[in-house]
Image (tube, helix red, strand yellow):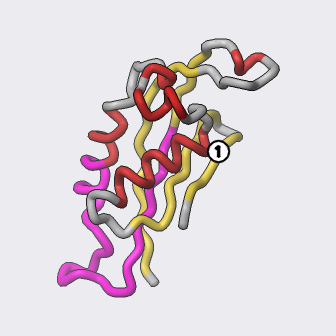
Amino acid sequence: MYEASVIADFSSAHNLRNYKGKCENVHGHNWKVELSVVSDELDTQGMVADFKGLKEMLKGLLEELDHKNLNDIDYFKKVNPTSENIAKYLYDKIKDRGVNVSLVKVWESDTSYATYKE
């Protein structure tokens, strides 16, 4: 099994509902997102996927979240905008594009991240 990964970032605000502590208040993060894709075989160029294409796709998706309050985005009006739920949101969006996603990792700081994979 081969795996290739790219990393991109975005900045946004959010607040956690039903949470007691500082994070119940609106605050921001400089998020980092890692996307990993897998394949049993390499393409004719010897790649799982073109890094350039993966980066462009990921950056395009992150534009929807960049410099926004995540709580104002339709999906996150119903789903708490935790790192875990952001990872699942992105995973599903990427999978819907026909990409063989292995995992999506969302870092909210240099020391804290959440991963979603199936």
Q: Residue 62, percent across and down? A: 36, 37
Rendering coords of residue 52 (x, y %): 24, 55
Q: Is residue 13 left or right of residue 99?
A: right
Q: Is residue 56 magenta?
A: yes
In the rendered picture of this protein, how many numbered marks are placed on residues?
A: 1
Residue 97 position in % (x across, y down)? 27, 58
| Residue at the limit of the structure toward the right, as seen here | 20
Please name the residue that numbered disc 1 is placed on. 113
Q: Is residue 110 above or below residue 92?
A: above
On screen, residue 97 above or below 20: below
Considering depth in this image, is 79 or 82 the residue closer to the camera? 79
Q: Which residues are magenta?
A: 32-57
Extreme residue in the left direction: 44
Position above or below: 58 against 66:
below
* Left or right of residue 76, residue 97 in this image: left
* Quadrant of the frame with the C terminus: bottom right
Q: At which x and y percent is residue 76?
A: 50, 31
Q: Quadrant of residue 106?
A: top right
Quadrant position of residue 61:
top left
| Amino acid found under the numbered disc labelled 1 | Tyr
Side (left or right) of 97 relative to 106: left
Q: Is residue 82 left or right of residue 91?
A: right
Q: Residue at x 36, y 69 (%)?
A: 100
| Residue in the image at 71% along x and 21% along y | 23
Residue at left offset 38%, top offset 26%: 66
